[in-house]
Structure formats: C-alpha cells, structure tokens
C-alpha cells in the first residue's frame, strides 16, 4: 500500500498533507522560539523552509515518507510539522518523526494528540505491524516523551546519522507493535484528556 496523502484530525489538532502553500506558515511557526538554533530539531532556518518542504515532498514521491503540517484547531494556526518516514510497504512498518512545534505549544497536549492520530492511522488504516521512533541519544527530553507514549526501547545505533552541525549522532530506537496498540490507545486517550484539561 502506498502512503496516500490524507488528513487526520480530532478536536485538538488537524494533520494536513504538507504542500508548498505551507512554506510561509512553517517559517512563522519555526520563528516562535527560533527553533532552527536548537541542536536537536530539524526546523528550517529563515529562508530555508521552501527547500525543507521540497525535500519532504520528494520523500513522499519516493514512496518512503508522508509529511504533514500541524494545525491547532482552536486558533486555526499552523504550529509545526510531523511525518511518517522509513515506510516499508512489504510488512508494512513505518516510523514517526521529523516533528517540531512552535515554542508556545511545546510540552502541551498537542504532541500527544498528534502521535495518537498518527499511531491510529498507522495501525488501523495502514495495517502496520509496528511503528518506530528514533531520537538522538543526547536528547533525553525526546526519549522521555517517546517512552510516555508507551513505546519500548529497542537499542542504540551508534554513529548512525549526522546532526545539522555535522557531528555524528547515536540514535536511540523505540517501537510499538500492533498487538500493543489497543492498550497504548487507551493510555493516550486518558493522558490527552488530562493534558488538555491543564492547557
């Protein structure tokens, strides 16, 4: 099955297929917190959002990615981006990542809402056997966030990728299996309720 563009949404967030029409909105979102200065994000620097979007769209054309923009429902604002990547159709199996949000939405209910939508689509529409998450071994906040989703740590790939500054990164790998999804879904639903009430 090919990764077809689709829109995913709940009462908190809408994940819309990324397009070149979103370049300006993504630059605005990345400017909230100057996210391109953070060593652990892939957010584009000023003037680089178009190239960022074009590269993501090429990944979709190659059949290995499905990128989204994140629209916060109450304001209607585009506040970040996320995507499926490393799609293996034969299994199928996919990873979720390249995720960043404007600073004002970090550590809110937004990430839980986005991940729940992406996981639900992966397991219930794409029929994935597993969903992966990857993060820098130095990014302890990201590791804790992935673990709060209910993902299991699988191991570390050493000298796996280069960071934007050219240094080598070790990648920590996590996964959720299809048979674990019902319990993870219930947990995320309860967590989302609690976080949204605090927002």
Image (cartoon, rainbow, N blue to C red):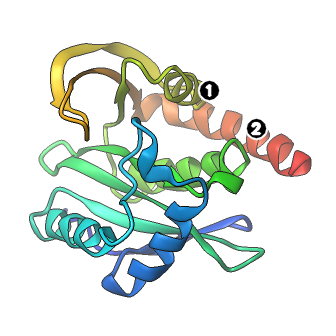
Rounded to the nearest angstrom, the CA distance separating label 2 from label 1 is: 9 Å
Q: Which residue is mark 1?
A: 148
Rendered residue at 55%/66% (across/down): 29
Residue 191 - label: 2
Whether residue 190 is situated above or below residue 33 in the rendered picture: above
Q: Secondary structure at mark 2?
A: helix
Residues at discs 2 and 1 in contact (Cβ within 8 Å)? yes
Say if 182 sits above or below 73 in the image: above
Badge 2 density bin: few <14, some 14–19, many ≥20, Cα 10 Å: some
The N terminus lies in which quarter of the figure? bottom left
72 to 108, vertically: above or below: below
Most extreme residue toward the right is: 197
Q: Is residue 44 left or right of residue 119?
A: left
Looking at the image, which residue is at 59% across and 33% down?
184
Q: Quadrant of residue 3?
A: bottom left
How far from the left and from the top, in percent, is residue 189? 72, 44
Q: Position of residue 112 (x, y in %)?
A: 64, 45
């Amino acid at each position: 099955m090919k990764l077809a563009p689709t829109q995913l949404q709940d009462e908190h967030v809408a994940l819309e297929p990324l397009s070149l029409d979103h370049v300006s909105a993504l630059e605005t979102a990345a400017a909230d917190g100057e996210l391109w200065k953070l060593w652990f994000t892939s957010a584009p620097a000023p003037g680089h959002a178009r190239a960022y979007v074009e590269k993501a769209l090429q990944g979709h054309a190659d059949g290995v990615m499905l990128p989204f923009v994140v629209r916060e429902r109450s304001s209607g604002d585009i506040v970040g981006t996320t995507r499926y990547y490393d799609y293996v159709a034969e299994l199928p199996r996919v990873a979720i990542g390249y995720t960043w949000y404007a600073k004002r939405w970090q550590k809110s209910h937004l990430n839980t809402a986005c991940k729940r939508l992406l996981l639900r689509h992966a397991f219930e529409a794409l029929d994935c056997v597993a969903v992966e998450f990857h993060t820098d071994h130095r990014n302890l906040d990201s590791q804790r966030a992935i673990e709060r989703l209910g993902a299991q740590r699988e191991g570390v790939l050493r000298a796996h990728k280069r960071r934007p500054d050219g240094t080598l990164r070790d990648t920590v790998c996590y996964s959720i299996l299809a048979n674990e999804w019902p319990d993870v879904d219930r947990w995320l639903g309860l967590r989302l309720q609690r976080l949204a009430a605090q927002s």
